[in-house]
Image (spheres, rainbow, N blue to C red):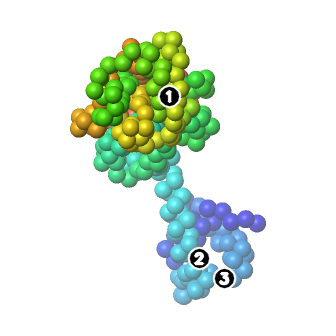
Amino acid sequence: MSLSLRQLEIFEKIASTGSVTRAGEELLLTQSAVSMALSQLEQLSSVPLFERSGRRLVLNDAGRLLLKDAREILLSVKRVEQQLQGETGQLTGELLIGGSTTIANYLLPSLLGDFARSYPHTRVQLTVGNTQQVADLLATGQLDIAFVEGPCHNRDLVAVHWRDDELVVVAGAEHPWGRDKCVTPELLATAPWIMREKGSGTREIFEDAMDRAGIRYAIALEFGHTEAIKNGVAAGLGVSCLSRIAVDRELEYGRLVEVASPLLLGRSLNLLKRRNSCCTALLGAFLEVAGGVWGDDLKQFATPN
């Protein structure tokens, strides 16, 4: 014989009313059904749970110990039911979001702050990686949604464009390019480039632009983080091609210099989800906040594809 939630519910009602008859009336059960459930529960516990005081049933020490646990279990079940039925009156739960490096570092924090203020009883876990890493995590069910830079090549995912971005060629303030502020294809070909790793959306756009221009180039250094690249360029280790979003402050203060080039460096920032995945109430609320910040195109993710 195994323990059931119904037995705990009947036990709790007997404890609160002190009567098998009244417990049955409140639960709409016959007296014999209530008595049987109590008898089964006492068989499972191997000890009586009540003592009779006149016409009233009173918990003994074993019953009092069980009542505490029973009420915690019943309350937990009630909370789960309310969440499933949307009856809590407030949104709860955890959302697993992925962000490629540029987006996660420079755009997502303010959005997550807006969402946290709007839905204080929710929790967001942000995973940061390059575009390919984040897309792979989403495709395998380890994320609910992802924001990435550039194209996504995974056929199991659906992408929607939500913002344009521009990459810029940058050099240190003391670099010769920093003085000229303009370079030829020949200079681009011989430059020591400091770039992100393979799988990065920034790296892919840069390589595509150089290939379209017919420029052969060499990567001198690979760094896995944009901040490290900016510091390396500022220190004179080489030049780079980064999102304007990522270098805006350094350009403003003169730590880095934007260099005009013949490269076509526009790209899109995309929101990804799994094909045919459902949109939960929590994800729908997040997309509503994101749509208010970044545009209504994001709200189309609330419908299945």
Task: List x then y, in percent, for residue 36.
Answer: 68, 69
The quadrant holding residue 237 is top left
Q: Which amino acid does label 2 sit on?
A: Leu
The reply to whether dot 1 and dot 2 touch (C-beta < 8 Å) is: no
Q: Give the CA distance from mark 3 to mark 1.
A: 71 Å
Pick whichever, 43 or 157, lies toward us.
157
Placement of 245 over or under 89, stated as above or below: above
Residue 298 visible in this rendered orientation of the protein: no
Residue 48: mark in rendering: 3
What residue is pinned by disc 1?
203
Res 268 visible = yes
- Which is nearer the N-term, disc 1 or disc 2? 2
Mark-to-mark CA distance, 1 and 2: 61 Å
The image quarter containing residue 73 is bottom right
Q: Is mark 2 on a helix, strand or loop?
A: helix
Residue at image location 41% in from the left, 31% down from the top = 239
| Other residues around mark 3 within 10 Å, as few (<14) / some (14–19) / many (≥20) | some
Residue at screen point 41% across, 28% down:
241
**Mark 2 surroundings within 10 Å by alpha-carbon count, few (fewer than 14), some (14 through 19), many (20 or more):** some
As helix, strand or loop, the secondary structure at mark 3 comes to loop
Please name which of the two marks, 2 or 3, marks the residue nearer to the observer. 2
Give the residue displayed 52% in from the left and 68% down from the top: 72
| Residue 305 in the image, given as x and y percentages of width and height | 53, 23
Q: Badge 2 is on which residue?
A: 66
Q: Which residue is drawn at 70% across and 71% down?
A: 40
* Residue farthest along the front direction in this orientation: 176
CA separation, marks 2 and 3? 11 Å
Among numbered discs 2 and 3, the one appearing first in the sequence: 3
Query: Which label sits in the foreground, 3 or 1?
Result: 1
Provide residue 255's location: percent of width, then percent of height: 28, 38
